[in-house]
Image (cartoon, rainbow, N blue to C red):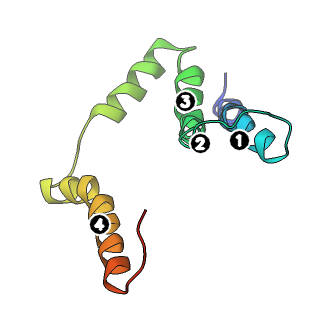
Amino acid sequence: MNRHLKLVVFVALAYTLSWLAWAPLWLETLGALDSQPSQYWHLAGDFGPLIAAVLVSARDRDALARLVTRVVRVRGHARWIIGAALGPMALGVGALAGIQLVGGDVD
């Protein structure tokens, strides 16, 4: 499979898998479902691109090995890696603290 076809298959799979995972949410919004999905169900759709990358790469063992190596390999200075790991959490805590300071309600 050439690179352009792999890209097209990846994008199509990523969108399809994500939207299929999100289908219960929008079906419930439209009133087509009687039960309400979990409030965390939207997280399942976030894995669509990951699953699509594995499926497209799985056709070739070398490509799958390269994908896993790229995901696992950590390159960069330690402070940037720590910042990338802890930065979003620090921003969330800061936002919650700011809401509390202005008298907002945090559920």
Picture coordinates of residue 21, whole percent (x, y): 66, 33
Label 1: which secondary element: helix
Q: Which residue is mark 1?
A: 25
Numbered label attached to residue 90: none
Label 4: which secondary element: helix
What residue do we see at 15% from left, 55% from top?
A: 77
Residues at circles 2 and 1 in contact by the CB criterion of under 8 Å: yes
Splitting the image into 4 quarters, where does residue 48 fall?
top right
Q: Amino acid at mark 1?
A: Leu
Q: Which residue is mark 2?
A: 42
Farthest residue, direction bottom: 102
Task: Work out whether residue 12 can be spotted.
Answer: no
Residues at circles 3 and 2 in contact by the CB criterion of under 8 Å: no
What residue do we see at 21% from left, 53% from top?
A: 81
Splitting the image into 4 quarters, where does residue 92 fall?
bottom left
- Give the mark, 3 or 1, whose residue is nearer the N terminus: 1
Q: Is residue 55 left or right of residue 96?
A: right
Q: CA distance from mark 3 to mark 1?
A: 24 Å
Q: CA distance from mark 3 to mark 4?
A: 32 Å
Farthest residue, direction left: 78
What residue do we see at 47% from left, 22% from top?
A: 63
Residue 38 drawn above or below residue 2: below
Picture coordinates of residue 54, whole percent (x, y): 52, 24
- Give the mark, 2 or 4, whose residue is nearer the N terminus: 2
Splitting the image into 4 quarters, where does residue 101 fall?
bottom left
Q: Amino acid at mark 2?
A: His
Q: CA distance from mark 2 to mark 4?
A: 22 Å
Q: Nearer the viewer, mark 3 or mark 4?
A: 4
Which quadrant does the N terminus fall into?
top right
Q: Which residue is mark 3?
A: 53
Residues at circles 3 and 1 in contact by the CB criterion of under 8 Å: no
Q: Nearer the viewer, mark 3 or mark 1?
A: 1
